[in-house]
Amino acid sequence: QSVLTQPPSVSEAPRQRVTISCSGSSSNIGNNAVDWYQQLPGKAPKLLIYYDDLLPSGVSDRFSGSKSGTSASLAISGLQSEDEADYYCAAWDDSLHVYVFGTGTKVAVL
Amino acid sequence: QVQLQESGPGLVKPSQTLSLTCSVSGGSINSDIYYWTWIRQPAGRGLEWIGRISSSGNTNYNPSLKSRVTMSVDTSKNQFSLNLNSVTAADTAVYYCARLRLVVGSGWFDPWGQGTLVTVSS
């Protein structure tokens, strides 16, 4: 039920910046806030960004979120090897009456 | 800080009922601002929201699973539970419990339990 579309993978060299897109619709991203989760290999997801662009306590400020219309983005600056993980966007969908997650993006540090 | 821990059988036979419990520590499950949720992830695939329950027992389920899902909460034990009946191999997944913070127009899952793998097989 992945109605939020993300690129399958992105890669970049250390210390560079990557951006992950999350495309939705008016019933989810267009009308509700977006969250982002980081899932390290073999681990549970962890909240990275909430309410479009807010950082939870303890999360590095190298991560930032933004939203425009029915799309959202997660940016990682100063890329580090420890950032290699899967990243998921999420939002409530008013039409489906469910929380929907993105298709997930694997970040690789070259 | 609040921690969540899933428990339950790792193997369930087809057509039977999957039952999991999430124990909450470091804080009370009784809250007006938090819901308690279940999310699952088949191997190598994405996340699927199963449903949520408040400490007073109000529930919302994913319509795709609604006919088979029941959630309950036991405030005396600081636990909440998931029952999924008539399981098939398609229900094989890692099941996570998580706390859901609700605000107008949004909600976020934090923290998450470590997850428990449930395999449906005879």
Image (cartoon, coloured by chain):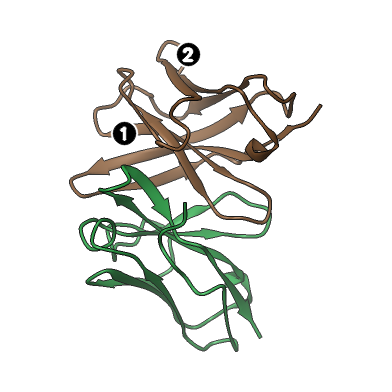
Chain colours: A green, B brown
Estimate the x, y position of residue A71 in percent, counting from the top left.
31, 71
Residue at (36, 39) in percent of width and height? B100
* Above or below for A70 versus B114: below
Seen from the viewer's position, the closer of residues A15 and A91 is: A91
**Residue extending farthest right:** B122
Residue A62 seen in the figure: no
| Quarter of the view holding residue B1 | top left
Amino acid type shown at disc 2: Lys
Estimate the x, y position of residue B48 in percent, counting from the top left.
50, 46
What's the chain of the residue with tag 2?
B
Asked whether disc 2 touches disc 1, contact meaning CB atoms under 8 Å apart, the reply is no
Assign a secondary structure to mark 2. Answer: loop
Between discs 2 and 1, the one toward the N terminus? 1
Residue at (40, 14) in percent of width and height? B75
Seen from the viewer's position, the closer of residues A78 and B63 is: B63
* Above or below for A73 versus B50: below
Residue B9's tag is none
The reply, left or right, for residue A21 in relation to residue A25 is right
Assign a secondary structure to mark 1. Answer: strand
Amino acid type shown at disc 1: Tyr
Q: Which residue is mark 2?
A: B77
Residue A17 seen in the figure: yes
**Residue extending farthest top:** B76
Residue at (60, 41) in percent of width and height? B114
What's the chain of the residue with tag 1?
B
| Quarter of the view holding residue A15 | bottom right
Estimate the x, y position of residue B4 in percent, counting from the top left.
52, 33
Residue at (23, 56) in percent of width and height? A32
Q: Which residue is mark 1?
A: B34
Q: Cα distance, mark 2 to mark 1?
A: 17 Å
The reply, left or right, for residue B115 in relation to residue B74 is right
